[in-house]
Image: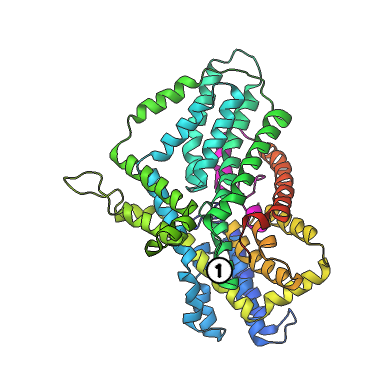
Amino acid sequence: MNKPNSDTTQLAPLPLRLAGLIVGLLAFILIGQLHILGFESDLSNQVLAIAALMIVWWITEAVPIAVVALLPLILFPSTGIMSLDEAARPYSNSVVFLFMGGFIIGLAMEKWNLHRRIALNIVNITGTHANSIILGFMIATAFLSMWLSNTATAIMMLPIALSIIQLVSSHHSGKGNIKNFALVMTLGIAYAANIGGMGTLIGTPPNVVMSAFLKEKYSYDVDFFEWMKLAVPIVVLLLLAMYLIMTRLMYPNRMGKLSSKDIIKKELKNLGLMNTGEKIVLFIFLFTVFRWVFKDLLNGWLPMLKSDDTGIAMLSAVLLFILPVERKTMTPVLQWNDTSRLPWGILLLFGGGLSLANGLEKAGIISALGSSVASFAGNHTLLMIVGLTILAVFVSEVMSNVALVMVLVPVTGGIADAMAIDPLLLAVPVTLGASCAFMLPMGTPPNAVVFSSGYIRIAQMAKTGFWLNIFASLFISLSAYFLLDYFFHDF
């Protein structure tokens, strides 16, 4: 789940916000009233004006991006583009509730510290060699980020990593490069948090935005398990490549075996035995994953209990508010005040992006843009995939990845229609690429979190991130081009 990029509360610097407010309003007026883009239809110009306003405010974060997502509810009806009912319908898309269910399960894991226990056990298994510890942290971070906010995952993992770095530093005999060890430990947490979210539909908001668009535009349901069959191998291989590039090529530490096992065991001991809350959350988590993975088989056996991915997620979420952690008081695992930490703004973002896409589609802008780009590209499908994926990866360094996917995925649909190819071929790699912001501290919150550790310089992050961006762009593009048909049902 990627932010500020997906953070709906963070404010940009005041000069940038003021500039964004002014530029956005000017674009809205010039495009809508003066028709400076050359479209003859008033409808097209009005929709483009609203799109320009929203995109400028999203990029500059002049207004909280969740609030910007509400503009279609105001501007579409008032300009006659569509009725309020039509503009509001995307905000209740079923995929929004799929993500809400995933958020609630994540909240329960955090409340009862199950995520910390999982992370420490993974790291404990990987051994005491310096590179094994780094790999263990990457695996634990990526796995948790598949189900939890990548920001929360990075915040949780960093203090554990810093404890180990400090322990190793205090006992360092001079063998190897302790600075490289600390650099890769911290960078690895940020990058693994970004990569891990790609693995499930609920792992990061861009995945959900893409899924909701495909359902709205093409009536195509992206199956939870089908997505994992493609995305999890990509996550694993990207993680392995990242580990090898950083530990073998760019920043080898050559430190060998370390004495950090004790600190991990101490942390696990401090957690104590699993309490009732943890056990219930673990059961619900495993139950949910099992239902998602074997949904088709179970629906065939038990047609009376037939359910889709959203229904499964919401059932699990509701159970967490019902199942008690103790019999006497019947206090449930989650209480409603726990949802104060639920990122409600992200859910509004999905609806706003879909509503904007509907307006652009109704005005014929997406199909026109798609035809234009397709005529330029000809029949070079792979070249188009690579170009769009590289664009998504690098623009995501400076723009909200949620907003980026909201804008770019509908365009990929128009391009795919004009080229007469499967829209998934363009939408999937663009969506995955939007999660690969590795170069800048402001690219994603995990990057910013680990940068605050003091072990990383911007030049190091930019250098490492640039090569990882290039590798990820090409790897994701080729994976989508050659393997997508094997993992997804017919479009």
Up/down of 227 relative to 28, above or below: above
In the rendered image, residue 434 lying in the magenta stretch gets the answer yes
Quarter holding the C terminus is bottom right
- Position of 309 with respect to 487 (left or right) is left
Q: Nearer the viewer, residue 346 or 432?
A: 432
Measured as percent of width and height from the top left, residue 218 is found at 60, 71
When asked about the image quadrant of residue 384, the answer is bottom right
- Position of 20 with respect to 367 (left or right) is left
- Position of 450 with respect to 102 (left or right) is right
- Circle 1: residue type: Lys
Give the residue drawn at x 70%, y 76%: 367
- Position of 256 with respect to 249 (left or right) is left
Up/down of 412 relative to 461, above or below: below
Up/down of 413 relative to 268, above or below: below
In the rendered image, residue 234 lying in the magenta stretch gets the answer no
Up/down of 128 relative to 377, above or below: above
Circle 1 is placed at which residue position? Answer: 215
Residue extent of the magenta highlight: 430-456
Q: Is residue 15 visible?
A: no
Q: Nearer the viewer, residue 222 or 370?
A: 222
Callout 1: SS: helix
Measured as percent of width and height from the top left, residue 387 is found at 76, 57
Neighbor class of circle 1 (other Cα within 10 Å; few <14, some 14-19, many 20+) is some
When asked about the image quadrant of residue 127, the answer is top right
